[in-house]
Image (cartoon, rainbow, N blue to C red):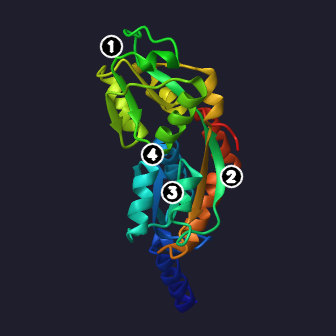
């Protein structure tokens, strides 16, 4: 009996010493590297933490930036497991190294002004005023391409003072009071809280962006990458995006 008790004790101790990653019933472990549009920073960071909590053996790391720049990095061989773009066009640039994309949210533009709206900006027409300081995304960035559609729909030729490489850089200009107005996504205005004010405009309906997500075909951690994509597409993900101001596809 003592021998049996001893063997049981050893087995119990061995179980207690098993690494957490090995205890996961789903078998997921390792790092998942996600390249994601800058406008997804807040939502993906939240979902990443929730995914890690549900899968203790997995670590999610993010590379946020302009979708065009991220696509270029991937095409040049940057290692990644998942790509979430703010535009189908940028994901299409790397379609030879990604799986089938799924559109998971939509986003629309909003005028962002510093708190108190010192420039007295009322609509898109004000972006043509030379006396106002204006910030926009560069044309190759999804928020810049969407802005161009909105201006074309409004018949306005903007006079930007600065063109930024991602939407968060544009928003920073507004938060710091360096510009009188900018075009960013309404989700970014919401995420900024009281630091900026948002102004809706009707032409935003003409420039809605679809956001696709796809795993990389040669993802270093393919199983966990697939699981993360599924988590983004889950009801939990949908709720997170809706609360942040995104539209359903």
In the picture, the quarter occupied by the C terminus is top right
Q: Earlier in the sequence, mark 1 or mark 3?
A: 3
The count of marks equals 4
Left or right? Give the position of 178 relative to 90. Answer: left
The Cα atoms of the two marked residues, 2 and 1, are separated by 47 Å
Residue beneath label 2, please? 234
The Cα atoms of the two marked residues, 4 and 2, are separated by 27 Å
Tell me the crowding category of disc 2: few under 14, some 14 to 19, or many 20 or more residues within 10 angstroms, Cα based.
Answer: few
Callout in the foreground (1, 4): 1
Callout in the foreground (4, 2): 4
**Residue 69: where, in percent of width, then height?**
39, 54
Q: Secondary structure at mark 1?
A: loop
Q: Earlier in the sequence, mark 4 or mark 3?
A: 3
Residue beneath label 4, please? 141
What residue is shown at x 51% (from left), y 20% (from top)?
124
The Cα atoms of the two marked residues, 4 and 3, are separated by 30 Å
What residue is shown at x 52% (from left), y 72% (from top)?
97
The Cα atoms of the two marked residues, 1 and 4, are separated by 25 Å
Q: Earlier in the sequence, mark 4 or mark 2?
A: 4
Q: Secondary structure at mark 4?
A: loop
**Residue 242: where, in percent of width, then height?**
65, 36
Residue beneath label 1, please? 131
Name the residue nearer the viewer: 83 or 56. Answer: 83
| Disc on res. 52 | 3
**Residue 58: where, in percent of width, then height?**
48, 64
């Amino acid at each position: 009996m003592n021998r049996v008790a001893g063997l049981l004790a050893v087995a119990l101790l061995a179980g207690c010493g098993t690494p957490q990653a090995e205890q996961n019933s789903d078998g997921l472990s390792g790092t998942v590297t996600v390249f994601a549009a800058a406008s997804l920073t807040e939502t993906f960071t939240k979902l990443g933490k929730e995914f890690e909590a549900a899968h203790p053996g997995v670590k999610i790391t993010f590379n946020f930036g302009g979708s065009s720049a991220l696509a270029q990095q991937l095409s040049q061989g940057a290692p990644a497991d998942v790509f979430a773009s703010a535009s189908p066009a940028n994901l299409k640039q790397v379609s030879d190294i990604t799986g089938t994309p799924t559109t998971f949210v939509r986003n629309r533009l909003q005028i962002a002004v510093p708190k108190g709206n010192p420039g007295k900006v009322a609509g898109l027409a004000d972006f043509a005023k030379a006396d106002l300081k204006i910030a926009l995304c560069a044309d190759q960035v999804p928020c810049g391409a969407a802005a161009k559609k909105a201006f074309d729909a409004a018949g306005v030729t903007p006079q930007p003072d600065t063109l930024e490489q991602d939407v968060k850089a544009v928003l920073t200009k507004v938060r710091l009071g360096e510009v009188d107005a900018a075009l960013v996504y309404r989700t970014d205005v919401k995420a900024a809280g009281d630091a900026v004010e948002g102004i809706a405009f009707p032409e935003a309906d003409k420039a809605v962006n679809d956001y696709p997500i796809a795993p990389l075909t040669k993802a270093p951690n393919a199983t966990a990458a697939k699981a993360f994509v599924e988590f983004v597409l889950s009801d939990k993900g949908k709720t997170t995006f809706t609360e942040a101001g995104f539209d359903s596809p």
